[in-house]
Amino acid sequence: MVRLRRLRMQDLLEEYGKLRIETDAYMVAYKKIPLADTASRLKIAKEIIHSSARANEVMLKVIDRFSPTASKALSFKLKNHIQNAEEQLNEDYTLPKFRGMSESVIKSVINSTIDNSIMFTELIQQIIHIAFITAVEAIKRTKGKPQEELDGYLKSRLLKLGFEYVELYEGAWQALESEKSDRFRHCATSTRELVRKFLGEKGSERRVRLKSVLKSENEVKLAESLADSVEALYDVLSKGVHKEIDYETALLSLKITEHLFRYIFERESSI
């Protein structure tokens, strides 16, 4: 059985962050090794490659939530990258055939491999961009009459909870479509507030609420996963680290929120 932890995007992002910190620590250690200590430099270089690879594998799981196609393509690139890096680092630079090479050349070879690992991490950000666009293209198909029907359905149900719920929902769309500089963060703030207001804060409170309206444990897990995705997307937007995809991120947060509420409302009605 897949553990609940693996289903939560927030946990995946936290795990990715920890592995990036680990990779950075290896980078610091690498720079402190004397230039002449080739064996130690090679050993740490391998640790950097493997740590970065683990971080990237976690990020692939995040990407897979939005675009399995992009995730599959990037997974193939990751496999080739690790294979090439290991082949390069497995050279024994202490052998006689390398004696004519200066230590600076050896350093350049090792640094090149490390740089490739860092470049691969940057490539992942580009693939995330592609993944979001893929998701947004699918989202655009719901515009028009289907979107109007969804709006009407959600507003009627939210109004029963209180007018403030409708205000948050409409405010998220208004923020997204405005020209204000903080529109994307405002949109994500509204969606997160809407989810928290309805389900409560993260943790046991949220799970108790979901269990009261959903029939099965699998339904609860799915709803929790969607709610956690809204939290994670808010964190991304509040830090403003991917400005080129802020619109897609905010829109995705809003659409996930819509489908989370519809999912709960429909099952609530069937009880």
Image (tube, rainbow, N blue to C red):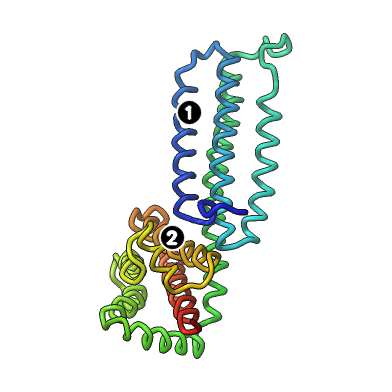
- The picture places residue 217, in percent across and down from the top left corner, at 53, 64
Label annotation for residue 260: none
Write the residue at 69% across / 24% down.
90
Q: Quadrant of residue 178?
A: bottom left
Residue 140, relative to residue 186: is it above or below?
below
Whether 31 is drawn above or below 53: the answer is above
The residue positioned 71% from the left and 11% from the top of the image is 95
The residue nearer to you, when weighing 9 against 221, is 221
Residue 112 position, x and y percent, is 58, 30
Q: Which residue is nearer to you in this view: 181 or 269? A: 269
Q: Which residue is mark 2?
A: 228
Looking at the image, residue 115 sits to the left or right of residue 96; the answer is: left
Does residue 47 appear left or right of residue 16 in this picture? right
Task: Name the spot of residue 179 as percent of width and height, x first.
Answer: 31, 73
Q: Earlier in the sequence, mark 1 or mark 2?
A: 1
> Which type of secondary structure does the marked residue at label 1 adopt?
helix
Which residue does the image show at 49% across and 56% down from the upper left?
Answer: 8
Above-or-below relation of 96 to 10? above
**Quadrant housing the N terminus:** bottom right
Does dot 2 land on a helix, a strand or a loop?
helix
Residue pointed to by mark 1: 27
Q: Give above or below for 127 relative to 116.
A: below
Which one is in front in this view, the residue at disc 1 or the one at disc 2? 2
Q: Amino acid at mark 1?
A: Met
Q: Amino acid at mark 2?
A: Asp
Closer-to-camera residue (260/42): 260
